[in-house]
Image (cartoon, rainbow, N blue to C red):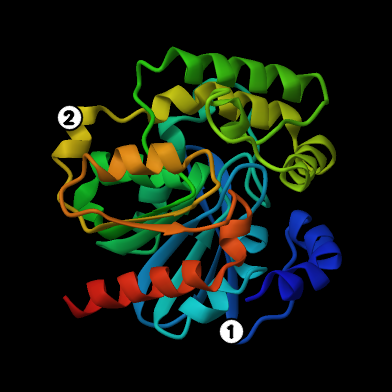
Amino acid sequence: MSLPTFASGFTSVLARALKGSRPPAAGAVEDSYLTADGKRLHYTLQGDGAPLVLLHGFAVNGDLNWRLPGFIDALANDFLVISLDLRGHGKSDKPHGKAAYGACMAEDVRCLLDHLALARVHLVGYSLGGFIALYLATSHPERLASVTIMGAGWEPPENARFKDALTRLAADLRAGHGINPLCGYLGDDRPRPGFLHRSLVKAITGFFCDQEALAAMVEGLPGLAVSEASLRQLSLPLCAIVGGKDPLRVSAEAMVARVPGAELTVVEGADHIGTMTRRLTLSTLRDFLRRQTRA
């Protein structure tokens, strides 16, 4: 999908998606819920084939992240696509307090698999969803057939700068200012996201989301930390896709360098959000997943 095509319908679809409703899509879509850890979580099912779980990014939902750019319709031709609204987002419950997030967000995915009686799935995560997917790959590798990390990677647990960034992000949210993307806080030596990117994320977090829930989620992110030793022991097929201008490219490269056999695709010229509008992103993901189902 080209950037002009994506942008042309963005405004109207954005409003619907942030409210949890979906634009029309080809194929039957099943709208469902499960309860995990006492929290009601929303997910959708579409397609037929090997099960594939999609985890969205920060402050959006499954529809805005995956359906709007066309990923769900494209992947549903070959897979049973399961798109989860993470706790704190979309139509799912939005608890307050950091203890409700961190590793609990990964456990929600495991509960989803149990709920659907799925032994193993292909897992794809973008941005926040990517960090959750990586945690799951190291904590429950037996439940995954493959893992794809998009717009995310590995941050060392001892990274003090990263922890300080989370504190400031939570404060920005509680003050009602919205936030710059998380990657914009990772250091002055990395490229800054563009004005459109910053404005979009600020608008979404400032006007459409439960800011206290998002702040609590940010504070709980250290609970998703993965050790270097765990990365080096990971034997799952792993694909990383990241924009050439995405500040989290550094994290993606650090992850791939530590996971045996991991694949990396850099989408040149794309920033953190723009990567989702590039044809190379979808074609790389689809090719990787098809190779895993044939293996």
Residue 88, how many percent across, how many down? 63, 39
Quick check: 209 above or below 264?
above
The residue tagged 1 is 28
Q: Of residues 55 and 8, which is closer to you in this image?
A: 8
Q: Is residue 222 left or right of residue 8?
A: left
Residue drawn at 32 percent across, 70 percent down: 288
What kind of residue is marked 2?
Ala
Q: Is residue 231 left or right of residue 279?
A: left
Residue 123, quarter of the rendered image = bottom left
What kind of residue is marked 1?
Ala
Q: Say if mark 1 contacts mark 2, CB within 8 Å.
A: no
Residue drawn at 58 percent across, 35 percent down: 191
Quick check: 238 above or below 184?
below
Q: Secondary structure at mark 1?
A: loop
The residue tagged 2 is 229
Q: Of residues 130 and 153, which is closer to you in this image?
A: 153
Give the mark, 1 or 2, whose residue is nearer the N terminus: 1
Residue 104 in sight here: yes
Q: Secondary structure at mark 2?
A: helix
Q: Badge 1, how many Cα within 10 Å: few under 14, some, many 20+?
A: few
Residue 105, how many percent across, how many down? 46, 39
